[in-house]
Amino acid sequence: MFLREFKNKDSLVFDIFKIRETAFPNFFVKKIYKTLDLEEKFDIKIKNFPFCLLPNGKDHIFFEKEFQGIKNKKCRNCRYDKKCRGLDKRLLVVWGQEALKPLKDLPEEVMIEVESRCNLDCKFCYNKNSFAKKERIDNLDSDYIKKIINNICKSGIKIVRFTGGEPLLRKDILSLMSYAKNRGLEVRLNTNSLLINKDNAKKIADTVDNVLIPLEATSDKEEAEITGELDSFSRKIKAIRLLKKHKTKIVRAGTVATKKNIKDLEKFFKLVLDLKLDDWEVYRPIPTKDNKEFWSKKDVKILTDKLIKFREISGKTFFIANSVPFCSYDKNKVNSVSSGALPEDGHIRFAIDPRGFAKPHYYFNKNIGNPLDLMSCWNNQFMKKIRNLEFIPKKCKNCSFLEKCRSGSRYIAKVTNGIYKSKDPLMAV
């Protein structure tokens, strides 16, 4: 047993030197990740361990005040240099300095809204908060988008996401995605899929690494009430099957967890399994002028418990993919089925819209710089404040989940209370 001590009844800290595989880095890290499966029941903390060796569990790492490990010169360029205290000298003797692999201070992906128009009119679309709420404007031209793609490559960013509006409305979308693919980027596509057909499905499958399709209901009748299109659900199912037939690497779905969809979540779960989707994620609704639906803490509880139940049935974890404060329910349970706030608000990525504005996320109407100077956008003062957690409420600063939860949605806090530093409405009082 390598668990070292209980911090309190709901959390535990383990000592890395209690693990037998300490001398074998790969086995060692696998053992730690296996332990993180317990996070539904415990707040798990890994003490005195460098971030670069556990990138998918970095929100569990903490350092004791008296600890000072060994770092190398390359660590100065790591995005976690100021937080990380290096590798324990006992492990350094076994693993060597080469074990430390600094993580570059780069966004994980850039999202390009290549098309402002959409062939659907979903009631809760986040674009209703953006420039597109009044009109659909001219899009970025192909040459400009290619310049952005070139800069993504030069910057060392690995992923580009094509989104909209509906990106497949662009006549040159396949050539743009191929352009990115040929330059070694991982290509992701957000599409409502209604324009996927026998003529283009194979090309999309060959070009795109990851396709995300929204499923907002489980029947044509129900989805028509949301999208305004009578047969949108049937056409989505047909598109998913076409993409699977042509062996698209990853085909996944996303569902806005409205109160009705939370109630009917079992139907979605069954559909996801029947379609053999690679992944499925659910989203907290983003409030718009036309959609004031806010989750209550009860909604968080019901959704969390259902996702945990689905994991027990399927062996797969389906995540809440945007931010929700963990203190809105049982912190450990929410943490175990939540991606936290990392995918939002500019923490690990940012978007470029059809006006040529770079912004922290799709629904942020805040220009952070020139899309042809990506690192300047990433290092914009507002973005740095977001990543450095300068907008979090005081009460969150000592929370053990802060690195992942990040006080929920700073955007929704601003929409609700007028300032970014206010509390997310779902936070416990």
Image (cartoon, rainbow, N blue to C red):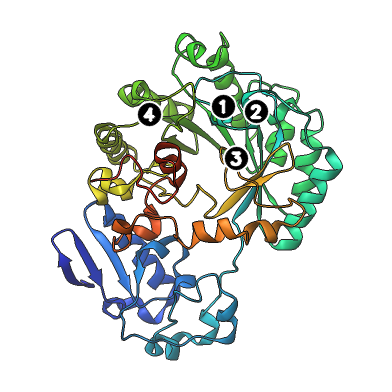
Rendered location of residue 229, percent (x, y): 58, 11
The residue singled out by tag 2 in the image is: 132
Question: Depth check: 148 or 424 in front?
Answer: 424
Secondary structure, mark 1, is: helix
Query: Mark 2 touching mark 1, by CB under 8 A?
Result: yes
Residue at 32% x, 58% y is 394
What residue type is disc 1 on? Lys
The image's mark for residue 128 is 1
Give coordinates of residue 294: x percent, y percent: 36, 30
Q: Look at the picture and state if 8 lies above or below 210.
A: below
Residue 257 sits in quarter:
top left
- Residue 208 is left or right of residue 404, and the answer is right
Residue behind mark 3: 365
Asked whether, in this view, residue 162 is left or right of residue 324, the answer is: right
Q: Which mark identifies residue 104?
A: none
Eyeballing the image, is 162 above or below 126?
below
Q: Amino acid at mark 4?
A: Phe
Find residue 154 and report its image quarter: bottom right
Residue 420 can be seen in this image: yes
